[in-house]
Structures are given as C-alpha cells and as structure tokens.
Image (spheres, rainbow, N blue to C red):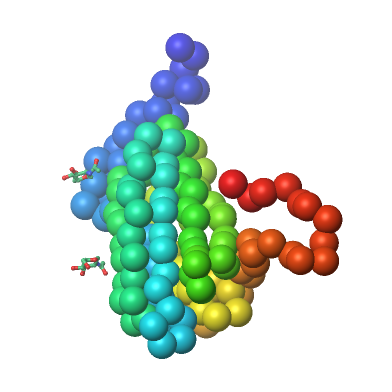
Amino acid sequence: MNRLLCVLVLIALCVGFNNAKMKNFVHFKNSLLQKNILKIHCQSDEDDLGIHFLSPGQTYNFSFNDSIFKTKIDCELWQGIGFKFFAKFMAYKSGGLILHHGKKIFWDAREDGIYFTHGKQIPKLEYKWVDTSPYVWDSPRPSLF
Ligand SMILES: *[C@@H]1O[C@H](CO)[C@@H](O)[C@H](O)[C@H]1NC(C)=O
Ligand SMILES: *[C@@H]1O[C@H](CO)[C@@H](O)[C@H](O)[C@H]1NC(C)=O
C-alpha cells in the first residue's frame, strides 16, 4: 500500500473510533392527509431494511455507522389509493473516505411530494410523486417496476 493511502486510512479509522457513538440517522414522517398510509422500503448495499407502513403522523427511522466503504441507501415510497403514487430516491449517501457522524436526515412525505431537511432548515420539496396508474388515453408506457 502506498504511504499516503496508509495515512489516510489511519486518519479515517481514528476519526471513526473517536466518534463511534455518533451514528447517522435517517428519519421518515408521514405528513399525508387523513388515513393516507405511507409504505416505505429501504435498501442499502448490504441490507434490506424491510417494508414499513406509517399512518399519518407516524415516523420511522433507522441509524447506522458510516464505513470507509461507500454507504448508499435507496428508498421506495408509495401512498394513495392502491399505493399508486410512487417515488424512488437515494435517501442517504456517504462520501467515501470522509466519514459522517451524527448526521441527521429527515424525509417528510406530504401530498405534493417528499420534503428534505437536515433538521435546521425549512424542509424543501425534493421529489414529486409519480402516478403509476395506467393512463387510459395513453399508449402503453414502460412499467416502473
Ligand atoms: C455502530 O457503532 C456502535 C458503537 O461503536 C456499535 O455499538 C453498533 O453495533 C454499530 N452498529 C452497526 C450497525 O454496525
Ligand atoms: C427512532 O424510532 C424509534 C422507534 O419508533 C424511537 O423510539 C426513537 O426515539 C427514534 N429515534 C430518533 C433519534 O428519533
């Protein structure tokens, strides 16, 4: 291994151990209208975090330790009648050698889309729902699934 890489790995490990208790949190909240259930399915490179259902007002979170290997978490969300509204996005991504600790990410599912904030700023609309119900007047289009 070359010397610079050695030093970088050492630094990364030290930073990692010093902050081992500060895990990263990803939060989800159902801020949809009454009775509108939110379905969530998240997966990282290694783990399937399972399917979760949230009633309006409920939250769901998971935490994890960043590693020097790339951490990436993709999530799929559904809501509406027959869960016809769909969104898929990367809920979290780590930057490789720079480890993140105590990072907080909030995804707020609202009727007009999914809002994002790190907690301090006002949540910002990041992803819109895609209506997956078939269009009667449209020619067939590729399925999202
Ligand atoms: C994350 O780090 C903490 C503290 O070192 C440890 O207790 C926990 O098991 C780790 N969690 C995972 C998912 O590796
Ligand atoms: C994450 O969710 C669990 C279970 O609902 C809850 O007890 C915990 O307080 C949440 N953690 C954070 C940091 O919000």
Position above or below: 16 against 110: above
The residue at 49%/55% (across/down) is 76
Position above or below: 60 against 101: below
Q: Position of residue 5 (x, y in %)?
A: 48, 22
Q: In which quadrant will I find the N terminus?
A: top left
Closer-to-camera residue (138/77)? 138
Find the residue positioned furthest to the front: 136
Quarter of the image where one finds residue 53: bottom left
Closer-to-camera residue (63/80)? 80
The residue at 27%/49% (across/down) is 19
Instruction: Tell me, yes or no, if residue 12 can be seen here.
Output: no
Ligand 2 shown in quarter: bottom left
Instruction: Tell me, yes or no, if residue 145 can be seen here.
Output: yes
Quarter of the image where one finds residue 63: bottom left
Position above or below: 98 against 28: above
Closer-to-camera residue (32/62)? 32
Q: Position of residue 133 (x, y in %)?
A: 64, 64
The residue at 69%/62% (across/down) is 134
Q: Position of residue 69 (x, y in %)?
A: 43, 32
Q: Is residue 141 left or right of residue 4?
A: right
Q: Is residue 100 left or right of residue 81?
A: left
